Amino acid sequence: MNKSLILFAILSAIASAASAQSTVTIYGMADVGIDRQTGGAAGSITKVSSGIQNGSRFGFKGNEDLGGGLSALFVLEGGIGLDTGVSQQGGLLFGRQAFVGLKSNLGAITLGRQYTAINNAICSDIDPFQCSLSGHAFNMLSAGGTPTNGGNGSRTNNAIKYTSPSTVGFNGEVTYGFGEVAAHSSYARTIGGSIGYAAGPLSVKLAHNSVNNATATQTAKVTLLGGKYKVGTVAVNLGYAVNKNAFVGNSNVPMADSRQVITGATVSVGAGTVIVSFIKNFDRTVADNDASQAAIGYTHALSKRSNLYTSYARMSNTKPNTAGNAGGFFTVGNASDGGSGDRSFNVGLRHIF
């Protein structure tokens, strides 16, 4: 069955659900810009890129009141490359998110493909760029990547997640991802969670993610503590991460034992927002893959749903660009592109619908 037929079936099901008094929303984001990447081993490149600020997407989400404070919910979200029209996340139809669950005043339980607690902590509380533009934290931090096949591990397949309600400012989530290997429950298994506190101008979060490889002979672990504090139109961010065997984000650099510090700020100025950040990687192995990234960005709201953006970031590596990612060369990427060099400048437009 091709993707068109699958999509038609989903739309038909959604229409039926809507007629049965369920609340269903079709939503999405269209983001495209010009990206100039320099400092790569193969030379500089300029291209039209989709999802520089945030990955372009379309999605369906719904909620049904079951009575007694209980409701059913679902999210189906797929990534789209506006520059070529292809599906993102390896061509998956709903590669960004795909889950269903139940929610009450005791919290929510959801099952499916879902974001890791590390990803949520970095993008909502710790990274001033909120995982966007050239200052993207995943150029140097990991969201819980595996110890073998790389990637930043932002999502967990076959996952069951509990998300707590906010109680006196405290909140949390716990995720268990089944490896689904017969007779070996620990193979390819993921365990993660977070606990946070948010009240007034302060938000703080502690998060952890652990992923076993295909035979549970090696485990990738990431632990993160950080938060932000807002004073008027200024928000200041600070975070500290410990990485054991997890591949680092966009750059796809393997890290056996490393520490990362991230700091930065956002300043609202009229219809615009100025963003700055600095990230430092401390490699504790003999490989000595130390690096640092400095970034600045600006977004300007044209309306509640449309904005222009621009950003620039520079990575300082101890290893040359000829070393490649496996050799410890970190690249400057963005929300949808891992990048090719140690510098990137971009301008673009994002529309939310």
Image: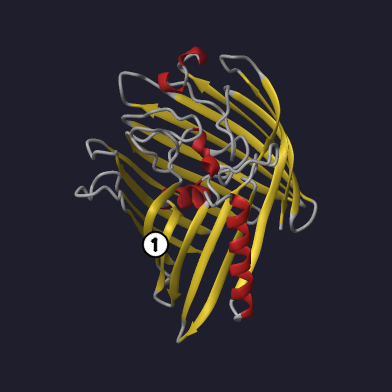
Q: Tell me: residue 5, above or below residue 323.
A: below
Identity of the residue furthest to the right in this view: 302
Q: Tell me: residue 23, above or below residue 153.
A: below
Which residue is located at x 25 percent, y 36 percent?
218
Q: How many marks?
A: 1
**Label 1 belongs to which residue?**
172
Identity of the residue furthest to the bottom in this view: 68
Q: Tell me: residue 74, above or below residue 69.
A: above
Label 1 neighbour load within 10 Å: few <14, some 14-19, many 20+: many
Identity of the residue furthest to the left in this view: 183
Is residue 303 or residue 20 the one in the foreground? Answer: 20
Which residue is located at x 66 percent, y 60 percent?
27
Q: Does residue 123 appear in the picture of this structure?
A: yes
| Element at label 1 | strand
Snapshot colouring: secondary structure
Q: Where is residue 350 in the image (x, y as percent from the top left)?
A: 72, 47
